[in-house]
Amino acid sequence: METRIRLLLLSIAVAACSGCATMHWPWHHPKTDAANASTASPDDVNAPPPSVIEPQVERREIKVPKIRAKDIELGGYYGELSIQDFGAQPVTGARIDYHISEDLFFEGTYGRATGGKTSFEYLSGNVQLLSNAERRFTYYNLSLGYNFLPGEVFIGRNLAMTSALYMIGGIGNVTFAGDQNFALNFGAGFRVLPTDWLALHIDVQDIVFKSNDIGVYQLKNNLQATIGATVFF
Amino acid sequence: MRSLPFVSLLVFLALCCTPVVSSARERLQVFVTEPYLELHTGAGRGYPVFNVVPRDASVHVLFRRTDWFKVRTERGVEGWASAQELTRTAMADGAPFHVNMGDRAGFASHRWEGGIFAGAYAGATLIAAYGAMSITDNLKIEVGVSQFLGNVSDGYLADIGLAHVFMPEWRFSPLVDLGTGIIRVEPKAILAQPVDRSDQIGYVGIGARYYLTRRFFVRAEYRDYVVFTKTNANEVNEEWRLGFAFFY
């Protein structure tokens, strides 16, 4: 019995002595901090030494110059518009083009002309089918164009100008004979650029609309041939 | 009447002066990092290459036309470089030169868009144009003008509203919109006592946009308009439209 108690006490004492090192007593903390500090010291050696000269130059802000996009053409045109039944008449107009890609562009045009006399009016003497205000032919078109034959034209030996033959088609409005009409336009044109900012155009278009100005609904074809100039900006 | 050619001539002359003024601008300089940069004689894929700029040499970018850039080499040679090739150059600080050529990411997130439509408003043929500015990728302020041409009346519409795109990152993204505006109706003379009238309108619409390629997309929409007439009953008109648009 006595030996059993002695064995128990002895084993507790052995366990206490061997375990005390593994246990974290509060008074052991300074030692562990010191140990950590000693392991950290090689890192300080690897760190770059403090610089002797502090650079006084501030980092410069580099401003990237903006690149101008010159995709818009603005200009005018002049030509001849053959108003069905009312003769071929001079037409003037303005156009704006926006080039979306090297192939495609949007175009908006506004033009005006004044219709002449019909053959009936000439032959019958004093008959007037339309008043002067009604003879005014104004239109606008919103079109999509496609540069289907881009190329270059050469004048002489030293001058080459970029050019394009394009097809164009769109929708719009025609005001004629006191009536507004939904119109379709389609045609082709040729554009040549003597300089980067100037373009010269030759255009042929048909402006088609349905009208009942003579009492029956009729499809009216109005062919137009114009020359024009535009400026890129 | 006669003033139009004169005004267009004035505008033309005024515009002629602008390139001279802009020539004093500071130009962006980029350095060739590929073996060489090709210079074409015109702004198009088919124009012949007439000059090459070697690696590490630089060019000044003068201006842009669609996806082509007019550049000037150190020797003063001017030619056209494609945006695709210029994206492989670096700027003076070594950063790659970035060009926005329009892609699906741009379709999902852009600042401006515009387009033209054809359609029908209350049975009349409709021609419309619109422009939009993005507040977020989902929300846009839209401004539109349209003209409708019918058998009994013609007229104009001007509207401003908000559009909400549900999934801007989807190729096919649905949208709804809501807005207000004014309408001007001009009845044709065949009607007895035609009176032009202007009224306020409100609209609600549902539509979708579908990305095509580069900067282009198609947009289709159905709208319901309420015309707040001066009579007792308001008018309700339907409109559908289909159009071609681009973003920037």
Image (spheres, coloured by chain):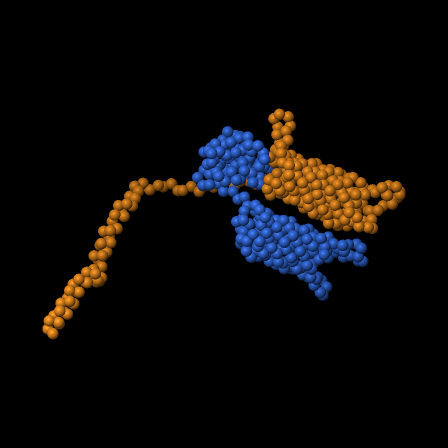
Q: Residue at x 53, y 51 (%)?
A: B109
Tint applied to chain A in the drawing: orange
Q: Position of residue B229 (x, y in %)?
A: 70, 61
Q: Position of residue A109 (x, y in %)?
A: 68, 43
* Quadrant in the picture for residue B167: bottom right
Would you say residue A72 is visible in this rendering? no
Q: Residue at x 53, y 53 (%)?
A: B169
Q: Residue lying at the far bottom in this picture: please name it.
A: A1
Foreground pick, B168 / B236? B168
Q: Position of residue A159 (x, y in %)?
A: 62, 28
* Quadrant in the picture for residue A25: bottom left
Check the image and report above or below for B185 versus B92.
below
Q: Is residue A112 left or right of residue B98?
A: right
Q: Residue at x 69, y 54 (%)?
A: B120
Q: Residue at x 81, y 42 (%)?
A: A86
Quadrant in the picture for the N terminus of chain B: top right
Foreground pick, B232 / A181? A181
Foreground pick, A17 / B228? A17
Q: Which chain is blue?
A: B
Q: Position of residue B240 (x, y in %)?
A: 67, 56
Would you say residue A165 is visible in this rendering? yes
Number of callouts in the render? 0
